[in-house]
Image (cartoon, grey):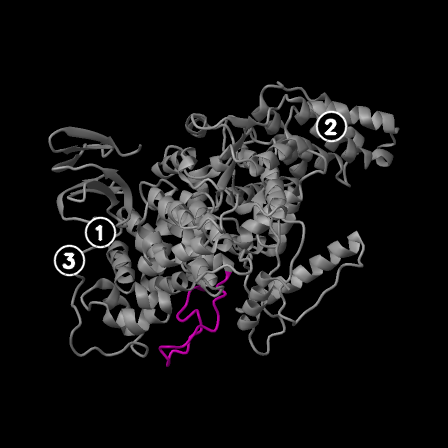
Amino acid sequence: SSDNCKRELYYAAGLRKPSKDIIPIRLDGGPFTWSEFVTAGKMYVDFHPASSADWDSKVDVLVKQIRAAIKSSSACENERPTDLSAGQASSITLPDLPELKAWLKPEGLEMENDIAEVFRKQFPGTREWLYSKIADFANSDDEAVFWTKGVAGVGKSVVSAVACNRLETAGKLGGYFFCKHNNVNRNKPQRIIVTLSYHLAQRFPEFANAINALRLAENDFLEKANVDVYFAKLIVDPLKRVPAGQRRNVVVVIDALDECGVVSSPERKALINLLANWKDVPGFVKLLITSRPESDIQSTLSVSFKAHEIDLNDEVQRKDLLLFSVNRLQLLQHRMGMTLELVNSYAERLAAKANGLFIWLALAMEDISNEFSDSLSVLDGYLTDEFDPGNNDYQMDRMYVSSLQRATQGMPPDFVASLARILAAIVVVCTPVSDDALAKLFGTTLSDVRTKLSLVRSLLNISDNTIQVIHKSFADFLQSPTRCTDPQFLIDIPVTNLFLASRCLDSMNKTLHFNIGGYDVKDPGSKPTTKDIPEHLAYSSKYWISHLTTSNLTSIPADIESSLETFTLTHALHWIEVLSLTGSLPVAQVQLARFLPNIKNERIATLLRDVPRFVNEFRTPIAESAIHVYYSALTMCPEDTVLFKEYAGRYKDVMHRVVVGKDSNWSSCLATLEGHKGPVYRVDWWVSEDKKTSLIASASLDETIRLWDAFTGVEIHQFKGYSGSVVFSKDGRFFATGNKSIMLWDIET
């Protein structure tokens, strides 16, 4: 009966489609322990009388039904509620939130599922000392930032997930982002900012109004702004717009900050500096961070905040490990034929052996409790294993080596090699994929992939949608020649990227085709009959360039060049269709433009050079409807371009005839860089020797010097100062500006 509930019900009813069995629904998962349903009167489910076991099974069944229905129903939304109390005046309405979501593209269901998986790993009664500190922080008006640091394996992400749950219960969760080293959508600073911005928009109506105004005024803002400007316009400025009557203390949570960005990259440096200056953010929004104690994070944040360290040798940490160890071993008491006293003695020794590492103890327990193992024998093995208590990496390495050796004992070499290649792919993929997508990329059966992965199940997190390594320390281990002593499983990153690039090209060449969205080709305004692009094809289309780029090739091997030639001459426009349907057009605009210098085959390079120009020139109709790749874009494509000559003859039935007014070639103007508020009177341009990086510096009467990425037109950074000249150093690391004095600028800092 609350005002907010009525708004949600009204919103859900408005989205309902006739003849749909499943209506708009909100199932709140993620870090939370409850489930909430908005059903607009269509469905009612009462779990209250059910026992705990019944509850779990019934919810699991219902979740599967809902997810299955969501795949075939565009009416479903997965929105967190807006916190609008009765009587608040606001011009933002609920239908604006989907528009903001479509513009910001925050992290959603995949991250929520990961958080839920982490949350399930908590053990009741542990870490209460830390949760108590976090609760005090959330309720105080003193500290602005709570930074928890600890080495790999101490359970920082579990702390973040439980903290999110408790903050939400207390009405104090403002937003959250869980970084992920192996997911390109969750290891970029910009993704943190847009996701937190969307979460805050759901909490504060005037914040949402400010973001909506930015969307309407600068729709291309997200494509051109740098991290500093993102933070200012998507977080700080909108928070300043929130009136006193709406303000209440909330906490935003950033987990695993160390997994965000490339160490020493300008974007990562900018983000860490912004977080270190959280005092610039209005005080009613606090920040909770967890991270490893990496040097760049530690040196920057420690200047502003005191870290709350999870010390491996701390007494409370050891008590938590003992509590977990006792509970798990007592469950195996009868199988091992022990007295309770002996079980507790073993548990105490095993907890001490963990040296403060929750991940080590959890994996050991998984191994000991395996139904096919001799639990007592495995337990004795862990207790008698000798290693340096101060070397955490070595301790985890021993765990990983023994797990892999037991899993593959007695297996044929080709079977082990295939398993190792699948594990390498799981580590190296740009974003986690399902076992089905892996099977299709590898050109094998789903049962083959599942059989192999079942042997190393304890080292993986496997859900319906993705497969990931259980912990970043396992990925680090597999990539280190000094740590992974089994050469069969050591990952060669460039070789694996080259393999994945090859599989992506092969997948696209086999699967791409004209009108993959199923449009009515006779109707330019028709809608696609399907946006459900197969996962392996969507992945291949989005990331084949990334894999080729990170393979560090000096030249493209003949087999891949042959696949690339087939792709270029047959499927280039089909590829743009998929990028349009999946919202990934920047791949053709930016990544392809960066990769072009690597292509030595002139026939391929000449045609592919047209693709970024083609997408830039006709982005609006292509983004609106993939079939306009042919209706509008190919129709108006200059006739003297290689792309037009190669493809126009194949799609005459779809294209229109242009009598006059069509250009014969591309405009000589490659791009217009917008941002300065005054006249620009000095410009310098720098290109790296390998031609993979190109920068432009511009000086203006608006008293700023701006640094631009010449490939993308994106503003990288803005420097304050009046300058009569600007010039790059030969290596591109510095540039100098001059007026009455000369200033030297370090681009990286």
- Name which residue type carries label 3: Ser
- Name which residue type carries label 1: Leu
Instruction: Specify whether 28 is left or right of 332.
Output: left
Could you tell me which secondary element the residue under label 3 belongs to? loop
The answer to whether residue 733 shows anywhere in this view is: yes
Q: Nearer the viewer, residue 326 or 366?
A: 326
Could you tell me which secondary element the residue under label 2 belongs to? helix
Category of crowding for the residue at label 2, using alpha-carbon neighbours closer than 10 angstroms: few (below 14), some (14–19), many (at least 20): many
Where is the C terminus found, in terms of image quarters?
top left
Disc 3/disc 1 C-alpha distance (Å) = 15 Å
Which residue bears the numbered disc 1? 673
Disc 2/disc 3 C-alpha distance (Å) = 70 Å
Which residue bears the numbered disc 3? 668
Tell me if residue 481 is in the magenta stretch: no
Q: Nearer the viewer, residue 595 or 741?
A: 741
Give the extent of the magenta segment: 511-534
The answer to whether residue 181 shows anywhere in this view is: no
Sooner in the amino-acid sequence: mark 2 or mark 3: 2
Establish if 672 lies above or below 68: above
Q: Toward which corner of the image does residue 517 lie, by quadrant?
A: bottom left
Could you tell me which secondary element the residue under label 1 belongs to? loop
Q: Residue 702 at x, y = what percent?
A: 18, 44
Q: Residue 383 at x, y = what percent?
A: 73, 23
Which residue bears the numbered disc 2? 322
